[in-house]
Amino acid sequence: VALGALGTPLLRPYVDGDWEAVVDLCLLAFAPGCESLERLLGTDLDWRTCIRRHLRSLTQSGERRRLVVAEVGGSVVGVVHYQVDRGTRSGCIGVSAVHPARQGRGIGSLMYRHALDAMWAQGAKYVTAEAAGDPSQAPARRAYEKVGFVAVPTVHYVMGPGRTRPGAATRPRRGKT
Ligand SMILES: CC(C)(COP(=O)(O)OP(=O)(O)OC[C@H]1O[C@@H](n2cnc3c(N)ncnc32)[C@H](O)[C@@H]1OP(=O)(O)O)[C@@H](O)C(=O)NCCC(=O)NCCS
């Protein structure tokens, strides 16, 4: 009996038959964050299409071998993608998601540890991961920190259409007369 059938997460490479489950769990997992970003920007981001397209590009390219799924009880409940840049010898955690009904049980951090082990084994000198600072990605930040990532705060600016503030470049520069 496979480990994943006993309720213990089994991590394995993505295969074609996982497509529907992976898309479904990603759309469910990313909905809160994407919908709140749409509200903030006041614009439709068509994020479902973007997610599908991104997953399609991963599964139809060489990246597919760095796409790992987590299976519990015979169902795919999580996915993580990682990359290693051989030039800079750096790794990064890409898309990662756990089905909302299975979140908060250690599956995300298990997937991150697995991806990290693979990246160290492939010669990465350091690994990066990104999460938004808003509440929707609090579980992602917590999971990253649980496996050992240290936060380097960065401010990511966004703006929706029609929100550019008017202004003119006529003011004297500070400190100049
Ligand atoms: C990020 C994600 C993959 C983590 O998967 P997971 O299986 O929930 O991860 P874990 O259970 O290992 O860790 C999640 C941690 O966040 C904690 N958490 C949950 N909700 C939280 C909240 N609102 N604030 C702070 N921490 C929270 C959990 O309690 C857990 O920590 P603990 O083990 O110390 O209790 C998953 O939450 C997810 O799919 N999120 C939406 C997509 C996303 O943000 N992806 C990451 C960026 S690509």
Image (cartoon, rainbow, N blue to C red):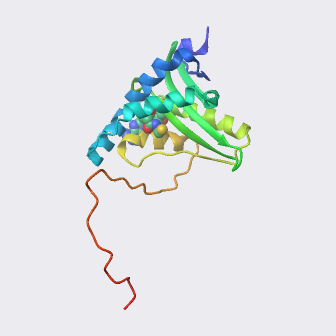
- Which quadrant of the rendered structure holds the N terminus? top right
- Quadrant observed for ligand 1 in the rendered image: top left
Q: In this view, does 168 lie above or below 127?
A: below
Q: Which of the pair 34/141 is nearer the observer?
A: 34
- Number of disc labels: 0
Where does the image place residue 21, in percent across and percent down from the top left? 46, 19
Residue 65: name its quadrant. top right
Question: x, y percentage for residue 50?
Answer: 42, 34
Q: Answer yes or no: is residue 24 visible.
A: yes
Left or right of 126 in this view: 158: left
Residue 107 appears in view = no
- Which residue is the extreme one toward the bottom? 177
Q: Nearer the viewer, residue 90 or 162?
A: 162
Residue 19 location in percent, x, y? 50, 19
Q: In which quarter of the image is the C terminus?
A: bottom left
What residue lies at 49% left-to-right and 33% top-to-bottom? Answer: 54
Q: Is 137 left or right of 87, judged from the image as shown? A: left
Image vertical order of residue 72 relative to residue 158, above or below:
above
Residue positioned most to the top: 1
Give me the residue at 33% from left, 53% from top: 159
